[in-house]
Amino acid sequence: MDRNQLAKMIDQTLLKPEATNADVIVLCIEAAELGTFSVCVSPTFVSLAAANVTNGVKVATVCGFPSGKHETEIKAAEAKLLVSQGAHEVDMVIDVGRAIMGDWDYLEAEVSAVRKATDGALLKVILETAALTDEQIANSCQRCESAGADFVKTSTGFHPAGGADVRAIKIMHETVGGRLGVKASGGIRNIEFATELIAAGATRLGLSSSRAVLDGIAATGTY
């Protein structure tokens, strides 16, 4: 895998609450220069990002973010609006507490509702894996697949329990790999960690420091 191939696995991400319009425009320019797969922005920036992406870069956004503690109808309505504004991909957050309680029917129903609302856009489901046991991660992945998700994803990057790790990616890959994509996100700041996650089964990476990671390839010769 060369630098360009790795770039095509990256969602260039900007989800800081203090982000501005100018920050999003810079993000879109950088994504085009680096050749990343997409930019991932907060919901209020979807229209702006859609108007500024070039070089085939897609627009991704988040739904029910970052807590997941939104009623299912709200998540579905938000997702529908975001797709209408130009989002090609939606990363929704599950109600993590429902997974911890083992309320799998609820989890599957909320993912299914967002799936129906997204009108053909790609749907990734954020599990917040650092807060879950191995069994809870596997069960969540199974229910996401049953509900029609396209990807399962590790984390928002905002949970105190942590972000992506190799343990979670291996479980996710073993559960749905080859049928659903597996996105690693949260705390990926160097090429060494990115390489570990890809080896474990990640097929997409959410990075807020894409240039630094990609520059690390040249510096280390890893890819």
Image (cartoon, rainbow, N blue to C red):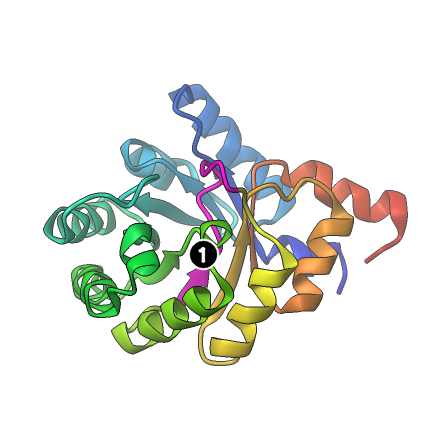
Is residue 25 shown above or below 208? above
Q: Residue furthest bottom?
A: 178
What residue do we see at 38% from left, 72% from top? 139
Q: Nearer the viewer, residue 179 or 87?
A: 179
Main secondary structure type of the part rendered in magenta = loop
What residue do we see at 29% from left, 65% from top? 102
Total marks in image: 1
Magenta segment includes 153: yes
* Callout 1 crowding tier (Cα within 10 Å): few <14, some 14–19, many ≥20: some
Q: Residue furthest front?
A: 101
- Residue 182 rendering spot, x and y as whole percentages: 51, 65
Q: Nearer the viewer, residue 138 or 2?
A: 138
Query: Is 53 on the left-hand or right-hand side of 110?
Result: right
Is residue 94 shown above or below 148? above
Name the quarter where the C terminus is drawn: bottom right
Is residue 109 shown above or below 155? below
- Residue 5 rendering spot, x and y as whole percentages: 68, 61
Can residue 203 be seen at all in this image of the molecule?
A: no
Q: Amino acid at mark 1?
A: Leu
Query: Is 120 on the left-hand or right-hand side of 152?
Result: left
Q: Which residues are magenta?
A: 150-161
Magenta segment includes 49: no
Q: Secondary structure at mark 1?
A: loop
- Residue 83 rendering spot, x and y as whole percentages: 24, 51
Name the quarter where the N terminus is drawn: bottom right
The residue identified by callout 1 is 132
What residue do we see at 51% from left, 50% from top? 130
- Residue 143, by quadrant, is bottom left
What residue do we see at 85% from left, 55% from top? 222
